[in-house]
Image (spheres, rainbow, N blue to C red):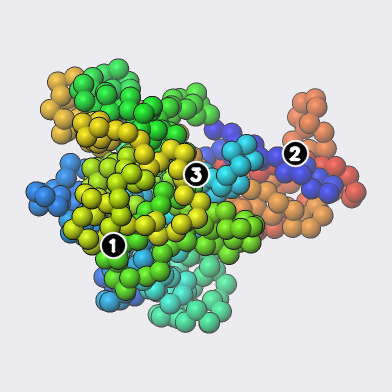
Amino acid sequence: MNTTAPFAAACALLLLAAIPVHADTEQTLGSLLFSDPNLSLRRNQSCASCHSLVPANGRETGQPLIAPGFVDPGNVENGSPVSGGSVSGQFGKLNAPSVGYAAFSPEFHWDNTRAAYVGGQFWNGRATNLQAQAAMPFLNPAEMAMPSRWAVVTRLKENATYRQLFNDVFGINLDDLPANDLAPATSPPPAGVLAAFDAAAQTISEFERGATFNQFTSKFDYWLAGMTSLSANELNGFNLFKKKARCATCHLSSSGIDRQGNMIPPLFTDFTYANLGLPRNVSIPGNPAPDPGLGGRAEIAAASPGGAELGKHKVMSLRNIALTPPYGHNGVFATLDQITHFYNTRDVLGRVAASTDAGFGVIGWPAPEVPQNINTANVGDLGLTQQEEADVVAFMKTLTDNYPATGQDPNVPPGTPSPFANLAIPAIPTRLGLGAPAVISLTGRLGKYYRLEFADSLTGTNHWQPFSTNRFGANGMLFPDPTAVLPATRFYRAVQLP
Ligand code: HEC
Ligand code: HEC
């Protein structure tokens, strides 16, 4: 794959071509870090604690579900909306979403065509991409609760396998870095520590881009590939999902095409943000104030006069949705039936006082927790019958991975590979910038080799000339171009070497 990102500056236009390399060793390291409880304050919690890699037990049956949902198995089993942290008594305020298919969310940005914010990670998109996201749970007091990045790197140093793999993958020698267990955030870390921490976040994001989290082995995928059929109820549910129930306006159900020309099956999200008018969940420990979502971020609030983004949360993918109850950013809905009934009847059912009311979702819904910007165009009064709601739910249950092993479908026997196994999962983009005139700065893949090249014209042949090849050790590294004569227009690119 070649990616090109044009970059305009006062006297130079920069071009970039990145050739991705095999990421197996890096994903191995990422998978180890993802499941390592030693990277939390009390050595009792890892990413996998809240984004489990093994199937959770179903609430009704107590038996393992048919695939991992990459959410907190305690929430699935007990219906609790939020997760406890490494420090006992600490709770988050939001429901842990699935890491499955999260890699497909584009970098957080404002989309001019749609006039909407798109992409990012978290319910409010505050992490621009998976790598930025992976750096955050370590330091969140309600999650892994480490005091600083230096303290995390000190834990990495303890492990002989990490010492070996950091060397192999990144050329980083953890032994060279001074230890400081529980270094406070106020202690400036010595040189090399922040690069090691960034490398850990990068390697976790590589793991999250891998096959574990992006299987495309649901019944729906095999149906899309023409290998099996949906039941009458599932098919009716899919048609309702696209038309009468309007779900597909936000949970897109059409396919796309990747850069290689492969079909990208539907991800059931457009990665935008909306306020559905969810009721407050008064069962969250400490009964926190309603979450303001996208519009609660200071920079978004500043750019959105009148609170135009308040109450909006990210449209989540519906892949594996049957495995990840409870539902919504505050986990206020216990089941798929309940959230579907909410979409259908929010504006017509009636009012109950609170989410703990016995009549919740039966005789009425509580008032929306954030009253601004509520979507009334596609949500709230759909006119679905009870059977139609049930069919929409039956359709959503076809989005669960691991169908060959569990579907008992002679057309898709155990071991059948995903019809979309060759799909390229979006990479975190590499960027060139100007550090100063004729000084190139690079944000890219740590540990990889890049050849920096310039051209004074892009017409004719052989215009690209290398001026430096480097193993990339820290984001924002600067690369002076010793041959530049200023002022002149010069083109640059960075080629990632295999
Ligand atoms: C204590 C539970 C907990 C732990 C531990 C935890 N997470 Fe999460 N995760 C959450 C919650 C809760 C959210 C949603 C928070 C928000 O939106 O503000 C979340 C959100 C995410 C998302 C965003 C998904 C999306 O679609 O927007 C990703 C990716 C993720 N976590 C990965 C990780 C990684 C990687 C780690 C380990 C470094 C980790 N999490 C550790 C609870 C946890
Ligand atoms: C206006 C856009 C929009 C429409 C239309 C829409 N959704 Fe959603 N959906 C969202 C957003 C935004 C969220 C997250 C909202 C929140 O938690 O505050 C969401 C969340 C969900 C969730 C829970 C996801 C999770 O990880 O907890 C399910 C299930 C769901 N939608 C199903 C449906 C179904 C079924 C329909 C049609 C009946 C539908 N949606 C229509 C935007 C939409």
Ligand 2 neighbours mark 3 (CB distance < 8 Å) = yes
Q: CA distance from mark 2 to mark 3?
A: 41 Å
User: Which quarter shows the N terminus?
Assistant: top right
Q: Residue 76 vs residue 430: left or right?
A: left
Q: Left of 401 or right of it: where is 432?
A: right
Return the residue nearer the eye: 483 or 206.
206
Q: Residues within 10 Å of mark 1 (few under 14, many from 20)?
A: some
Give the number of the mark in front: 2 or 3.
3
Question: Which residue position is annotated with label 1?
Answer: 354
Disc 3 target residue:
272
Q: Position of residue 354 (x, y in %)?
A: 28, 62
Q: Are marks 3 and 1 in contact (CB under 8 Å)?
A: no
The kind of residue tagged 3 is: Thr
Q: Amino acid at mark 2?
A: Gln
Which residue is depicted at the point 43% across and 27% down?
254
Q: Residue drawn 32% across and 33% down? A: 383
